[in-house]
Image (cartoon, coloured by chain):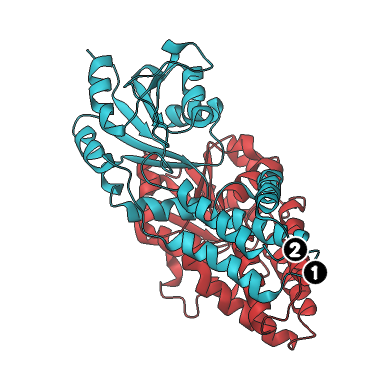
Chain colours: A cyan, B red
Amino acid sequence: MITVIAFDADDTLWHNESLYNMTQSRFAELLAPYHPPQEVEQRLYETEVRNLNFYGYGVKSVTLSMIETAIELSEGRVCGKEIQEIINFARWMLNEPIELLDGVEQTVVDLSKMYTLMVITKGDLFDQESKVARSGLADYFTHVEIVSEKTPEVYRMLLEKHNIAPEQFLMAGNSVPSDVLPIVDIGGQAVHIPYHITWQHEIVANNPTKPQDYFTLERISQLPGLIAEINK
Amino acid sequence: MITVIAFDADDTLWHNESLYNMTQSRFAELLAPYHPPQEVEQRLYETEVRNLNFYGYGVKSVTLSMIETAIELSEGRVCGKEIQEIINFARWMLNEPIELLDGVEQTVVDLSKMYTLMVITKGDLFDQESKVARSGLADYFTHVEIVSEKTPEVYRMLLEKHNIAPEQFLMAGNSVPSDVLPIVDIGGQAVHIPYHITWQHEIVANNPTKPQDYFTLERISQLPGLIAEINK
């Protein structure tokens, strides 16, 4: 019997990856005098991955990686004005209004009447708290947990902290490795809701683990129906 | 009767402000070709405070503020190599071994035998988690809470979450506005243990509460004795 539902935040409740994508394109454009765009994006990606262990996730981390990439690719010739441009990208990302995904508001409002709702999100504490506050949805969530990694161990500790048994817990998110597989691992229910909607069927079953291990939905608005089915 | 003791982390359990101070001096030295050191430090402080609302606390935030200040003070003439130097300051701060303050280890070990211990710290999630892990003290703390602000409301929510009554709660830390006054406000016991350096922003000019509202200790090793007194 599911009684607690947790949501991932970025690209599950609101658009996020689209902002990063736009920033990456602008960054590649900015560095066009030094290197071809495709190479710039590849190098930025490599720098970001390399820096995860130093900086963790989030806008500030990405911004520091962009600055580092700009210095490397320009062999130190990048100027103060160009670096300021990169800092402006960060400010734009941090201040951009939160755009909820289709159906999110209604689904969260409806589910909050019957279940305990949580947000469990990875990333920068300050930034994620600000986004939850700006989303207008904060009052519907009993707990907001911001974590630096989404491992089975981290989820297990969160459930213990809130006295939630895995059997009563369901997590919904757009990332299979972060929101789905660790939950399957600890014995909870997981729902994958991909960010880029390409699926035709309501429930798709082509995934690395056994198909019955977790659910896939095309839209968040299908979640209440699925949970009602599970709890029948 | 005190049963739960919470510690601030930076400059309460381990040295931190000293790293920032060293970085500030190096930063002022780096910008010496453009501006006198004292002016550089003042401008950096202004930028940091202005950016708190965008970035929150932590090394990444300070680094972005240093870069911004360098661009402003050099009127865009700062070069890639100099910006790289600033990024190197960040890496140095993030990788520097944790240096516990005198008496911390023994005090934490001793208190953990009789009380539930917590860490409540402000700052960057990724950075603070890493510091707790590297401190070697993680196993002594039942809860580690990293928050973006230390307001009475935030403390109230933390105590509710962990089912702790204010009367059984004592907080020890080096910052009067962050670790002491909000605790007095919610009806807990607070102990101020000053660090030899305090960031300008954390200094309270005229102590608004009455002196008997909280305790001040010179060293953390005096804490077990004080708690024994309170609990008598």
The answer for which chain carries disc 2 is A
**Quadrant location of residue A143?**
top left
Is A174 drawn above or below residue B120 in the view shown? above
Cβ atoms at labels 2 and 1 below 8 Å apart: yes
**Which image quarter holds the N terminus of chain A?**
top left
The x and y percentages for residue B185 are 36, 61
Q: Nearer the viewer, residue B59 or A93?
A: A93
Mark 2 crowdedness (10 Å alpha carbons): few <14, some 14-19, many ≥20: many
Q: Residue at x 64, y 77 (%)?
A: B69
Visible in this render: residue A163?
no
Chain bearing tag 1 is B
In the image, B215 versus A76, the foreground residue is A76
Q: Which residue is mark 1?
A: B81
Q: Secondary structure at mark 1?
A: helix
Tell me the residue at 47%/58% (across/down). B190
Q: Nearer the viewer, residue B226 or B176?
A: B176
- Residue occupied by mark 2: A71
Question: Toward which corner of the image does residue A159 lie, by quadrant?
Answer: top left
Apparent side of residue B4 relative to residue B44 in the rendered image (left or right): left
Q: Which residue is painted at 49% across and 18% down in the image?
A: A207
- On the rendered image, what quadrant is the C terminus of chain A found in? top left
x and y, in percent, of residue A87 in the image: 58, 67
Residue B136 relative to residue B169: left or right: right
Secondary structure beneath label 2: helix
- Amino acid type at mark 1: Lys
Nearer to the camera, B230 or B66: B66
* Classed neighbour count for the residue bearing mark 1: other residues with Cα under 10 Å, few (<14), some (14–19), many (≥20): some
